[in-house]
Image (cartoon, grey):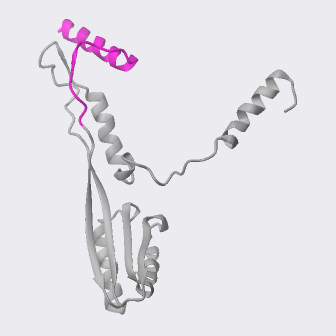
């Protein structure tokens, strides 16, 4: 038992400190992201069609309106009304995308939701199968919790919401500190 715990501590220390280890380390289980898409087509927005649109959006979001992405194409008038209805339901403007707008009579709404399938992690209390293997339970649980917590799992692959910015503004405090430390005016 003492030998197994020592081997675990050495492997854990090596993996945390960034050193390479000769121990057999299990490969990381990736977070799988799947996309679920549903489509609605309609030609008018009478009261019954508006209700059908609202039911469609509610079902597509599965209670997660913050993670629902809408791609709307077709009639400009119907698209504008669709955007209005979606905003009234609490769907974020940044998640609504208009494209291929025309003066036609029909509109097409594509509702996309991304789902993260986190890895199934073994228990911390499970015994090691042999002294040369090391299961990365801690890393697995961190990836599992991240996948469960993230608002839009697609952000784990690529976050388009945060735009690159100029670093000049961020450098102002460092430049101020340097001039303060040397006693020179900037």
Give the camera-side residue of 6 and 13.
Answer: 13
Give the camera-side residue of 19 and 62.
Answer: 19
Residue 98 in the image: above or below residue 172: below
Indicate whether residue 111 is drawn in magenta: no
State the residue at coordinates (69%, 36%).
Answer: 171
State the residue at coordinates (75%, 32%).
Answer: 175
Residue 168 in the image: above or below residue 182: below
- Can you tell which quarter of the image residue 119 is in? top left
Q: Is residue 92 left or right of residue 164?
A: left
- Magenta region: which residues? 1-29
Indicate whether residue 28 is drawn in magenta: yes
Q: Is residue 108 left or right of residue 128?
A: right
Query: Which part of the image, by quadrant, shows the N terminus?
Result: top left
- Number of numbered discs: 0
Percent coordinates x, y for residue 13 in the rendering: 34, 14
Residue 52 in the image: above or below residue 25: below
Percent coordinates x, y for residue 112 in the rendering: 32, 64
């Amino acid at each position: 038992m003492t030998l197994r715990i020592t081997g675990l501590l050495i492997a854990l220390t090596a993996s945390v400190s960034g050193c390479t280890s000769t121990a057999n380390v299990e490969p990381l289980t990736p977070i799988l992201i799947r996309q679920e898409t549903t489509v609605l087509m309609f030609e008018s927005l009478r009261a019954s069609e508006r209700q059908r649109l609202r039911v469609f959006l509610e079902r597509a979001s599965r209670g997660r309106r913050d993670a629902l992405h809408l791609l709307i194409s077709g009639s400009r008038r119907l698209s504008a009304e669709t955007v209005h209805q979606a905003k009234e339901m609490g769907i974020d403007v940044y998640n609504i995308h208009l494209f291929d707008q025309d003066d036609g009579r029909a509109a097409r709404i594509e509702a996309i939701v991304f789902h993260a399938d986190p890895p199934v992690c073994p228990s911390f209390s499970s015994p090691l199968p042999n002294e040369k293997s090391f299961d990365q339970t801690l890393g697995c649980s961190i990836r599992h919790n991240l996948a469960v917590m993230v608002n839009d799992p697609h952000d784990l692959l690529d976050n388009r919401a945060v735009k690159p910015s100029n670093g000049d503004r961020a450098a102002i405090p460092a430049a101020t500190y340097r001039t303060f430390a040397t006693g020179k005016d900037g």
